[in-house]
Amino acid sequence: MSTSQTAIPPHTATAPKPMLPTPTVNPFTGLAVAASGAEPLPVGVYFAVFRGVEAFSNDKVQDKLTWTWAVASGPHKGREATALTDLRLTPHTHAGRLLAGLVGRPLVPGEDISGLWTDVQKAIGQTWAVTVASGPKGGKPSVQNVSVPSEM
């Protein structure tokens, strides 16, 4: 070894693996996401464009629905507003409240909701007033209610 070269100490003989950058855009929705450790979307009411609802499962949770909106105006424009709900769609569940907001009327107990998914598809791309609040157990803020905006 020449005098200009420095030996790598044995405990650091392999270079550390490069860290992958935290994505700034959700690859599925194309919406801006908060960096890891960043503050969630603040509690409040936002005008947001509905992007859709899809089934979700991972190692920690199974059989859920992810509802996604893109904030359409204000300082958080482009940020993602989401809700993770159970599959149960009744007038009293989180998913039921979101569905009722998107179809513009309360759900009726015992109602066959299969026909309402056509209305949900029609809601994609439309602007809604979404209320972001802490969940009932005090978790991170998420979309808790949705309604037709009175005026943008």
Image (cartoon, helix red, strand yellow):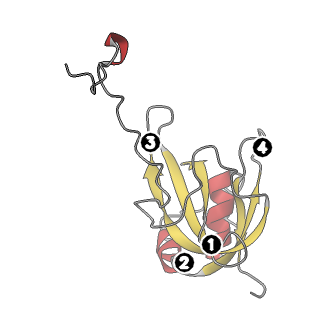
State the SS at label 4: loop
Viewer-closest of 128 and 5: 5
- The residue beneath circle 4 is 136
Q: Disc 3 residue type?
A: Ser
Give me the C-alpha separation between circle 4 and circle 2.
26 Å
Give me the C-alpha separation between circle 3 and circle 4.
21 Å
- The residue beneath circle 3 is 57
For the view shown, which residue lies furthest in the front direction? 3
Q: Disc 4 residue type?
A: Pro
Q: Of label 3 and label 4, which has the lower sequence position? A: 3
Q: Does residue 88 appear in this view?
A: no
| Tag 1 and tag 4, C-beta contact below 8 Å | no
Pinpoint residue 99: horizontal percent, then vertical percent: 61, 65
Q: Quadrant of the C terminus?
A: bottom right
Pinpoint residue 128: horizontal percent, then vertical percent: 66, 77
- The residue beneath circle 2 is 123
Give me the C-alpha separation between circle 2 and circle 1.
7 Å
Figure quadrant of residue 10: top left
Q: Total number of numbered labels?
A: 4
Q: Of discs 1 and 3, which sits in the foreground? A: 3
Q: Disc 2 residue type?
A: Ala
| Tag 2 and tag 1, C-beta contact below 8 Å | yes
